[in-house]
Image (spheres, rainbow, N blue to C red):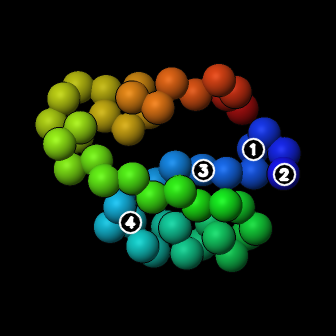
């Protein structure tokens, strides 16, 4: 798997998770129901190391 072979998706985002999986990406779902209450949400809390 390459560095861009896996993505993190908020639990409940089934449609986008299915589309990403159909493109061959490994989809990791995370319950972010409490984290989304703070500024920055999903992107800032996962601290991406590689940005395209």
Tell me, for residue 1, which label it has, or none. 2
Label 3: state its secondary structure. strand
Label 1 SS: loop
In the image, residue 38 lies at what x, y percent?
A: 18, 29
Q: Is residue 32 above or below residue 15?
A: above
Mark 4 and mark 3: Cα distance apart in space: 12 Å
- Left or right of 24 in this view: 29: left
The secondary element bearing badge 4 is classed as loop
* Tag 4–tag 1 contact (CB < 8 Å): no
Query: Disc 3 designates what residue?
Result: 7
Horizontal and vertical percent for residue 27? Answer: 58, 61
Q: Where is residue 17 shown, x and y percent of the image?
A: 52, 67
Q: Residue at x 38, y 65 (%)?
A: 13
Q: CA distance from mark 4 to mark 1?
A: 19 Å
Per the image, label 2 sits on a secondary structure element best described as: loop
Q: How far apart are the alpha carbons under marks 2 and 3?
A: 12 Å
Mark 4 in CB contact with mark 2 (< 8 angstroms): no
Residue at 75% across, 44% down: 4
> Disc 4 or 2, which lies upstream in sequence?
2
| Neighbour tally class for label 4: few under 14, some 14-19, many 20 plus, Cα within 10 Å | few
For the C terminus, the image quarter is top right
Q: Give the distance between the C-alpha atoms of the residues marked 1 and 2, in whole angstroms.
A: 8 Å
Quadrant of res 15 = bottom left
Q: Left or right? Give the position of 19 relative to 5.
A: left
Q: Which image quadrant is residue 36 in?
A: top left
Residue at point 73%, 69% (across, down): 23
> Dot 3, how many residues are within 10 Å of its Cα: few (below 14), some (14-19), or many (20+)?
some
Q: Is residue 47 above or below residue 37?
A: above
What residue would you read off at disc 4? 13
Q: Earlier in the sequence, mark 4 or mark 3?
A: 3
Q: Which residue is mark 1?
A: 4
From the viewer's side, name the closer residue of 47 and 15. 47
């Amino acid at each position: 798997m390459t560095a861009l072979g896996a993505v993190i998706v908020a639990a409940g985002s089934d449609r986008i998770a299915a589309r990403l999986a159909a493109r061959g990406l490994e989809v990791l779902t995370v319950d972010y129901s409490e984290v989304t209450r703070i500024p920055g949400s999903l992107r800032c809390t996962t601290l991406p190391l590689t940005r395209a």
